Image (tube, grey):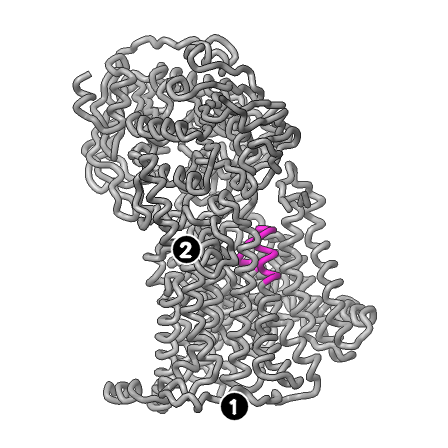
Amino acid sequence: MRLEARAEVSRTLQVAAPFAAIVFTLVVCSLLVAWAGVPVGSAYLLLLEGGFGSGFALSETFTRATPLILTGLAVAVAFRAKLYNIGAEGQLYVGALAAVAVGGAGLPLPPALLFPLMAAAAMAAGALLLLGPALLKTRFHVDEVVTTLLLNFIALLFVSMLLDGPMKDPAALGWPQSVAIPAELELPRLAARSRVHSGLLIALSLAVLVWVVDRFTAFGFEMRAVGANARAAAFAGMPVQAIVVKTALLSGALAGLAGCIEVAGRAGYVTLDMSPGYGYSGIVIAMLAQLNPIAVVAAAIFVAGILVGADSMSRAIAVPTYIADVIVAASLIAMLVATMLARYRIHWR
Amino acid sequence: MAADILDLVASVPFWVAVLRIGTPLIFGTLGVLLCERAGVLNLGIEGIMVVGAFTGWLAVYQGAGLWAGVGVAALAGAGLGLLHAILTVPLGLSQHVSGLGVTLFGTSLASYAYRVTLPQVTTPPTIEPFAPMSWLGVPVLSGETPLTLLALCAVPALAYVLNRTPAGLAVRMVGENPGAAEGQGIDVIAVRMWTVVAGSALMGVAGAFLTLSAFNAFFFNMVNGRGWICVALVVFASWRPGKALAGAILFAAFDALQLRLQQASGAGLPYQVYLMLPYALSILALVVMARRAAYPQALMKPYRKGER
Amino acid sequence: MESTVLTLSGITKRFGPLVANDAVSLDLARGEVLALLGENGAGKSTLVSILFGHYVADEGSITAFGAALPGGDPAAALAVGIGMVHQHFTLADNLTVLDNILIGTESLWQPFSRRRAAQARVREIAGRFGLAVNTRARVGELSVGERQRVEILKALYRGARILILDEPTAVLTPQESGDLFATLRELVTEGLSIIFISHKLDEVLAVSDRIAVLRNGRLVATRAARGTTKGELAELMVGRAVVMPTRARRAPGAAVVAVGAVHARDVRGHALLDGVDLTVAAGEIVAIAGVAGNGQQALAELLSGTLAPERGTVTLAGRAMSAQPRAWIAARVARIPEDRHAVGVVGDLAVWENAIAERLRTRAFTRAGFVRRAAGRMHAQEVVRRFDVRCSGIDVPARSLSGGNMQKLILGRALSVGAGATPAFIVADQPTWGLDIGAVAYVHQCLLDAAGAGAAVLLISEDLDEIFALADRIGVMYHGRLSPLRPAEGWTLAAIGLAMAGAEEAAHAA
């Protein structure tokens, strides 16, 4: 078997890749549904309906998609520069914690000033958490995949420690959760009787912003050059270490902001289970989007729909809700293969 | 305080705990080491350990013998390893992303399978795990289960295979200069794939130890980052089995120490600080060794046949 | 009696639209040394790669020792007795010499390696053919000559009866080459047949019995070594009469670049440059010769801003320069790196983006943080036009360019320092490596024109013909030291060869 690079990579193949991956994944996962003893057709129908089939379903999906867009962007920005940020989960949590620390501190400032301050604190926290691994990579050539992964565990323990201690909400009847932010700082709902909040708009505008930076600014040029060939970029005079660090700051900030938006848009306080793996799902979303910021939005909505749909489906029939996680993980693998097939032709000899 | 620690370190129960904590680390680190010597980074270890833990436990729960359970876990690990091998070796996909995909896939698949096979339970059902080898009559080892003995034997065995057999030489060559190996008639793709499968089987056994020996049930989050710690330990061990054993024992000793310290110091530091230490230590190990590391030179470089 | 040991019939190999080998038919007799002669890209390496099983021929067949040889199978080639010494050594640096020789010779199912017996056998072969080497040493610690000996031992250990050597003297000094030729003569008396690939006419005439000349993938002629001359071979290789260019001597201007007593080390602490002094004046071309790996690359990196010296001074137009590529670019230095794929361009970026990459953050191409795309594209169009870069538009990724066009893009980017201005200093590191004749002539002309317009040019090259064609002054690097620079007329080929081998006294004497 031999792989031959295609002379020209057609646009249609590139756009078709994620769809092919998703279809393949759904076909393979239907085996798992069948194992649960449930007819595949009705299961998938319930899944689709639960995620996209009604106004309510859509609102739930968009609510879930909001942090996913941001973590997807965080991962896409980093991966573009060949910085493998697997720590978005931890960055989200410390961002949420920082947001609540600032927002719930009772500072005598109007909400119009306090909210941006809260968001800035969240972004700073996320950025700082990724800064360590980024510096270890640029200075000491330490692989950032393992360091960011290990930091996730440390970050979560740190949050847990603070939730048990100084940031504990005394009125919360023993559950470890943080003090809440005041109601004025919470994000307004976009539609009555739904949970969709204006955080979605913030996420969407950030996607556009990242796209603009990537395509039109000198910094975006540098990020792409460093990610594609750091040696050549250095030779051409680009400050590679500084660029990697700046990318890390941007990526961590986006993930930290995801935490802030989740807090301000949903519960208003931090709990240990507020993120069911948004950071890791961000990796899948970034890959499905082929690291393109606008495509990240679509991929995030898709993944959110699967997660929401599976929740709803598992309430109706006996398919465990974990099927959603399996589908998401499998689509990552399928996407890897699909992107390769778009670029290479296989010769079976 | 120092006297307490000395007393602790000199006691037999301490070392029994150390070997028990260290066994999954030994298996896991040997598994990652084997894959990396052949040039393939296998970040699927976390997911493979979960799958190994679950399938081993399930087999025993369904009535199989304990060693059969270990065998099932090894097979399951090998299966996931085969997936990773296919993606990274002949297809040459990103070893980082493929490994992460395998981890996410393995973890979620195990959770799903658990819920499908046991839909109604709230507390995880238990099995009868391996019993300590009290018939051995040797201090420390008598308190361990047979899997620990297996782990300790696996270290010199793997070192022998790597350094003294033609197959081991092929593995090492394929991880240093696959073009050279191919020029000498070695099928690089086959050697890499088989090695990844074998290493993943070891990772599966690491997982099985958790459910069949250390504990007696499967519960979510039981692997809890041990796989990543093994990846760090391989760098610390400079890709040598003997040093891998030393690293795993050292790490386990520190882990056992902080457990005891936690109990001893009472309400000193919050317990989370103690739990953070293993991960922080692993990062430190990575940093310390990154400078001196003598990497297998073809690590993480996909091999395309005929590309010269 | 001579008998034929190897026959190639009608071998054809295509890589996409490129025909690397076009119906090549050859045979090799027992005890014969056959040279494959041709320029870069003539198809020599492809042909032997097919012979050895790295590639599969699209058409044609191979017969070895009377039996058909299956294609694409190095194991089959090895089994039949074909051994290859590759141009880029196929050795694992982290493993020992014995490991490298032993790999693949024992069945993978065997439970233990017979190392002691193997070691004895290696010693015996090494003694017979004068290839002494320490089997327990790590290959990474060996010298280049020693590594080549390991490569040859690998083939002999496996019982090679046909030995293929791909450009074996590319990395050797003239003296080491002499030792190699002696070894080859020994092998021939033992009945081995040798295929020797080279583009160096002198060697080919000295060591081979027959010479097969390849050009553009075709076998154009076979000659007996005794019955031909350098001139005839050169003409066959190139396809036309070769004219040796003459250079008009110019009076050099003021010194532009000065390197004073520079010492530099690599990350592992090995010495790269050991007290190097050098000046290059405006309008002159200084060429640095030397066998690869003696510090030329370090010198190029020093003068490109990517290597910081441990001691010593580096000045440009009187100002001290730091190891910052940006500073050198700003000082109008045109840098052409040795490795165009890995260092010269960012393959995934578009041609126009590569054209402006070196000056991205200048006012010309960035305003308020945004890239001035229109200005950048216009500049790229200009570069592509002036330097004849063949591409299907400036938006295609740079990696889709052929080697020659990529080099022209790099040249164009480096030399276009601003409307009509000439660079102050040009550092060209192996600028014509792997290029076809047309591209080589183009690059040479660019360098000559730039020197004529007042630029100071430093040329680093392993091609002595190129050096003599272009240089005003020549120096030779050996073990990190630079010989005194002398005018081109003051050097003979023999003197340069000796300097390349480190015989400094001889360099003074001639």
At 66% across and 63% down in the image, what residue appears? Answer: A330
- Report the span colored magenta: B82-98
Q: What type of secondary structure mainly makes up the magenta span?
A: helix
Quarter of the figure that contains the C terminus of chain C: top left
Q: Using the image as rendered, state which of residue A347 and residue C304 is in the foreground.
A: A347
Circle count? 2
Q: Quadrant of residue B83?
A: bottom right
Percent coordinates x, y for residue A138 in the rendering: 39, 54
Looking at the image, which residue sits at the far front? C1
Instruction: Name the residue beneath numbered marker 2.
Output: C114
Which secondary structure, mark 2?
A: loop
Residue at mark 1? A174
Q: Where is residue C317 shown, x and y percent of the image?
A: 26, 27
- The reply, left or right, for residue C263 in relation to residue A312 is left
Residue at horizontal 26 percent and vertical 47 percent from the top: C269
Q: Position of residue A218 (x, y in %)?
A: 48, 43
Q: Nearer the viewer, residue C441 or C174?
A: C174
Report crowding for label 2: few under 14, some 14 to 19, many 20 or more residues within 10 A (C-alpha): some
Marks 2 and 1, how far apart at CA: 69 Å
Which residue lies at the image location 55% right of the left edge and 49% below the top edge?
B187
